[in-house]
Amino acid sequence: MNHSEQMEALRRECGPCQRCALADTRTNLVFGDGNPDSGIMLIGEGPGEQEDLTGVPFVGRGGQLLDQMLDIIGLDRSKYYICNIVKCRPPENRDPAPEEVAACLGYLREQTRILEPRIIVCLGRISATRIIDPGFKVTREHGQWVEKGGIHMMGTFHPAALLRNPGNKPAALADFLGLREKIRQLCPEVYEL
Ligand code: URA
């Protein structure tokens, strides 16, 4: 099976998930979107209201801001894969609880195994502390690249945080320009797609 077929099989397995209490309140499970072959993975926190209603990650106001910034560096969803730490919306957009993250993490691990990413971008604290470093501080460490197990990783501001604090947008854009350089080094074919 190729990456897309494996990802679709995992999506079907994940669809009826009842591993945690978020299953009781979700409208749709939000599995992931984009190109499973690109080698580039963006990981957010968890679905918000619009994502819960549509089943697609990052389609609300934060997602639109993210799309705009990625457009500046020439990326659309044909060129990366995007998903979240938890696949179901936490009520009132609260942080996912540790047991919800723990219950869901197996799906993210499988997604990562299928994608074999060269590059991971963590959107916000919840993602960066799970994936890069439990002590990760977005304001201090955003845009810094680390390598773990052959995967180049960077954490940046969550787009919802940028909507609340627009003063951080230039810093976020600088992080995305750094991402463009990293893609040119590691996955140049992505810009040929
Ligand atoms: N915020 C996230 O972290 N993920 C989404 O899919 C939408 C908003």
Image (spheres, rainbow, N blue to C red):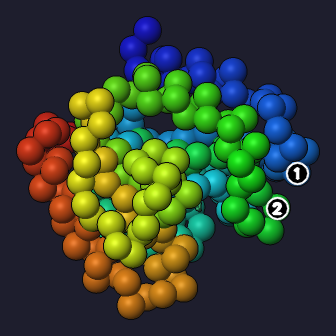
What label sits on residue 43 in the rendered view? none
Queried on whether the Cβ of the residue with tag 1 lies below 8 angstroms from ligand 1, the answer reads no
Q: Residue at x 61, y 28 (%)?
A: 106
Image quadrant for the N terminus?
A: top left
Q: Quadrant of residue 179?
A: bottom left
The extreme top residue here reads: 1
Q: Quadrant of residue 170?
A: bottom left
Where does the image place residue 8, in percent across and percent down from the top left? 56, 23
Q: Is residue 48 left or right of residue 80?
A: right
Q: Is residue 103 left or right of residue 186?
A: right
- Can residue 64 be seen here? The reply is no
Q: Which residue is mark 2?
A: 91
Position above or below: 169 against 187: below
**Amino acid type of the residue that numbered disc 2 sits on in the rendered structure:** Pro
Image quadrant for the C terminus?
A: top left
What label sits on residue 25 in the rendered view? 1
| Secondary structure beneath label 1 | helix
| Secondary structure beneath label 2 | helix
**Amino acid type of the residue that numbered disc 1 sits on in the rendered structure:** Thr
Quadrant of ligand 1: it is bottom right
Q: Residue at x 33, y 66 (%)?
A: 141
Looking at the image, which is closer to me, 147 or 181?
Answer: 147
